[in-house]
Amino acid sequence: MRNFLQHSLEKVLQICLYSISRLAKKSVPVGEILRKKLAFLQSRMTVQEQDPWFQTRVAQLESFSRQLQEMRGSLKSMGELKGRLEKATTEFQRGLVRTS
């Protein structure tokens, strides 16, 4: 398995270096080239884990990620509500001062 990964990484580097040398003549930024090549290679080198322990951990991480996104949305809306409450409280205080 280690030899396979090492060979795969060497192939990736060869492909990237070839692309860089070829596209460098066209004034394409190196970062852009690497990003596109790595995204392409990543899409081709996906791995399906068969171990149930890892599968449960991946499912837990995905669930946790969704929960964090929901919490982020809730916190944003709470922040907006807090701002509205602050404005309403300030207006109420000013109204009390005016009436007294």
Image (cartoon, helix red, strand yellow):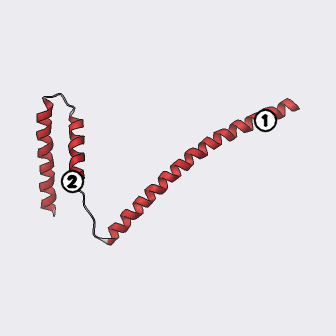
* Amino acid at circle 2: Arg
The x and y percentages for residue 21 are: 11, 35
Which secondary structure, mark 1?
A: helix
Residue 44, which numbered label? Answer: 2
Q: Residue furthest bottom?
A: 52
The x and y percentages for residue 57 are: 37, 65
Residue drawn at x 24%, y 36% as measured from the top left: 32
The x and y percentages for residue 46 are: 24, 57
Q: Quadrant of the N terminus?
A: bottom left
Q: Quadrant of the C terminus?
A: top right
In the picture of the structure, the residue carrying the numbered disc 1 is 93
Left or right: 54 in relation to 68 = left
Q: Is residue 93 above or below residue 58?
A: above
Left or right: 49 in relation to 67 = left
The mark nearer the N terminus, 1 or 2, is 2
Residue drawn at x 25%, y 61% as measured from the top left: 47
* Amino acid at circle 1: Gln
Q: Is residue 86 above or below residue 53?
A: above
Residue 6, which numbered label? Answer: none
Q: Residues within 10 Å of mark 2 (few under 14, many from 20)?
A: few
Which secondary structure, mark 2?
A: helix
Circles 1 and 2 in contact, beta carbons < 8 Å: no
Left or right: 77 in relation to 68 = right
Picture quadrant of residue 96? top right
Residue drawn at x 13%, y 40% as measured from the top left: 17
Left or right: 30 in relation to 73 = left
Q: Nearer the viewer, residue 97 or 52?
A: 52
Q: CA distance from mark 1 to mark 2?
A: 63 Å
Residue drawn at x 27%, y 69% as measured from the top left: 50
